[in-house]
Amino acid sequence: MSKPFSFISLLFLGIVLISSCDESAGGSLLPRHSGESGEVLLVMDERRWLGPEGDSLRTILEQYVPQLPQTESMFSLLQFSQAEMSGLLRQHRNIIEIEIGPDAEGQNKVTLLKDKWSKDQLVFRAYASSAEEWFKLIEKEFPRVVSMINDKETSRLQKNYLRNGNKELQAKAKSKFGINMLIPLDTEIAVETDNFLWIKRERVKYLGNSAHDITQGFFIYRYPYHGQVDFDHDVLLVKRDSVLKKYVPGPERGTYMSTEYRYPPGSRNITIDEKLAVYTQGLWRTENYFMGGPFRRIATTSEAGNEMVVVSGFAFAPKFDKREYVRELDAVIASVKFEKIEQVASN
């Protein structure tokens, strides 16, 4: 399993900008951005693209997403020369323009322009006076470029869920667990108890002439908080497995969801509303049945501090890449905020 990269933590901790110029003078008159989620359009001389300079870009932009069943690159890359850039291509959601050589407009820097040619667009411009300076620049600045693109993709999803969310289920999460969170519109309740809520999302995607089901789900559950030990990685996983065994059955008798330990999940500490939380990336499996996929999870204490509250998402898409489905899970999980106690009491 590949080493986790740093962008996920930045969904919760924020982004450090390189430099930013807002050139969205057209405001709402700008067209909507084009391209698919996770795509990055690179404007770069083909000779450089096919040489070591392009190799260095691919090394950082095609890192593997951690904790997926198959290896998948972080981004899908599209390369064009400056002469090939048409009006439509300029509207792409994520653009990186690269100029290397003594005639570069700038000297060894990266700039960011927001909403240059379309709404909610990122346009980076990277300048280096030589190949040697380019390699220094990419090592120094491009980890932040990666973080900003990933953060922007998450933000775009969240804006969509904010406009087109399931208000009824959002209200239920608030009243039942004291949390504000974005929930996609095309969702419904699969299982509900006093301390557990399973929200399911079912879609159909075609491969050739065949239709295939895409399943996503979100679990919200709580249990008494006993102390700092409840934040331990292994303790959280044991509790997760007990909850899933009880509430998430598989397709046949005696089958149920659990955690895949042959590829151990990875956790890191984050903060939510200035409180300690644990973010986990891992794989799930179905005991006694051949089903599995990726999951993402956060766990923290309630606003009152007397309960652990867990929000987890999973994806099942056996015929398709999982990267964008996991990005959707993260967009929901990263939106979690707690209602203040006085607000909860007044509901």
Image: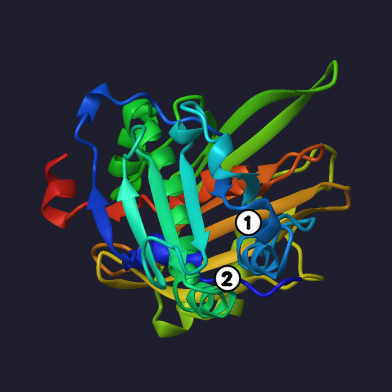
Residue 75 or 106: which is nearer the viewer? 106
Q: Does residue 319 show up?
A: yes
**In this image, 291 relative to 123: left or right?**
right
Residue 181 or 134: which is nearer the viewer? 134
**In this image, 322 relative to 111: left or right?**
right
Percent x, y for residue 207? Answer: 81, 25
CB atoms at circles 2 and 1 under 8 Å apart? yes
The residue most toward the top is: 209
Q: Which mark is residue 74?
A: 1
Q: Which mark is residue 5?
A: 2
Residue 32 or 11: which is nearer the viewer? 32
Residue 162, by quadrant, is top left
The image quadrant where one finds the C terminus is: top left
Percent x, y for residue 143? Answer: 49, 70
The image quadrant where one finds the N terminus is: bottom right
As helix, strand or loop, the secondary structure at mark 1 comes to: loop
As helix, strand or loop, the secondary structure at mark 2 comes to: loop
Residue 91 or 238: which is nearer the viewer? 91
Percent x, y for residue 67? Answer: 69, 63
Q: Residue at x 48, y 52 (%)?
A: 97
The residue most toward the front is: 103
Local packing at callout 1 (Cα closer than 10 Å; few below 14, some 14-19, many 20+) is many
Sequence order check: which comes first, mark 2 or mark 1? 2
Q: Does residue 298 show up?
A: no
Q: Amino acid at mark 2?
A: Phe
Q: Residue at x 64, y 44 (%)?
A: 78
Q: Amino acid at mark 1?
A: Met
**In this image, 197 relative to 26: left or right?**
right
Q: Is residue 91 above or below residue 12?
A: above
- Colour option used: rainbow
Local packing at callout 2 (Cα closer than 10 Å; few below 14, some 14-19, many 20+) is some
